[in-house]
Image (cartoon, rainbow, N blue to C red):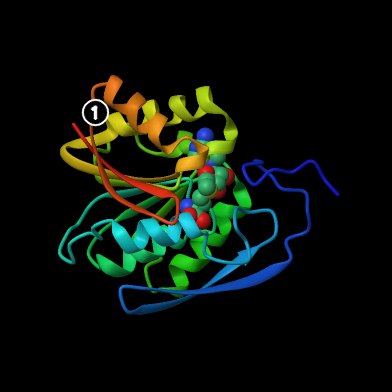
Amino acid sequence: MTGDHYFTAEPTIPAQPREVEFSVAGRDYTLASASGVFSATRLDPGTAVLLRKADLPAPDTTGPLLDVGCGFGPITCVLASTAPAATVWAVDVNQRARDLTAANAARVGAARRVRVAAPDDVPADLAFAEIWSNPPIHIGKAELHELLLRWLPRLAPDGVAWLVVARHLGGDSLHRWLVEQGWQVDRHASQKGFRVLRVTR
Ligand SMILES: C[S@@+](CC[C@H](N)C(=O)[O-])C[C@H]1O[C@@H](n2cnc3c(N)ncnc32)[C@H](O)[C@@H]1O
């Protein structure tokens, strides 16, 4: 046993390798995963709802797109595959998650367009056409708010953010909080207890 959380910077639990299979928009994915990262054995149900219900990027977009809290990279790989001209930034605090996302970007043939980074290593002058996230609710409310206040302002003026949050983990209160912060928030979809929020300026 260890005290690791999935958002530990350097997981100490041995990296038992795994593969996760799923399909999005008619495309099949087989991605590498490992213990010590979020939802290591299957596509998280919230992420599945997000990828099914949100509007995937247009095939001709160049981005840049951002996946906040990329885990082993399922959202990043779907974005990079759906938008084959786009640059996708994949950010996570967990080194193992970043390594897996880089490996998975190579698996889907997008290694040269996927930039995997720790949060502090994203260039400050980049504005994102789209931000996608299944955010880390378990880091705590204040920390989650801080995370969103850090990244949402990085949206381009006409950019859109797609978030998924379980209703029982505060999806509706997060919606209200985002509105209080001045964001336009649309509950785009609700399925299996998950809210898919579309956030714009
Ligand atoms: C709910 S998981 C989603 C993972 C992946 N996107 C997926 O759908 O399977 C949230 C991720 O956020 C990461 N995380 C936690 N705190 C973070 C922070 N301050 N900045 C960036 N990522 C963070 C965690 O390590 C975790 O991988």
* Amino acid at the residue labelled 1: Trp
Q: Position of residue 50 (x, y in %)?
A: 37, 56
Q: Nearer the viewer, residue 135 or 87?
A: 135
Q: Position of residue 165 (x, y in %)?
A: 44, 44
**Rendered view: 197 above or below 15:** above
**Which residue is found at the position 56% from the left and 61% from the top?**
100
**Which residue is found at the position 17% from the left and 62% from the top?**
58
Residue that label 1 marks: 183
Does residue 125 appear in the picture of this structure?
no
Q: Quadrant of residue 57?
A: bottom left
The residue sitting at the right extreme is 1
Disc 1 residue: CB within 8 Å of ligand 1: no
Q: Is 12 left, or right, of 161 in this rendering?
A: right
Q: Is 99 left, or right, of 69 in this rendering?
A: right
Q: Position of residue 156 (x, y in %)?
A: 19, 37
Q: Could you classify mark 1 by the number of other residues whose Cα lies within 10 Å: few (under 14), some (14-19), or many (20 or more)?
A: some
Q: How many marks?
A: 1
Position of the C terminus, as image quadrant, is: top left
**Which residue is found at the position 60% from the left and 58% from the top?**
39
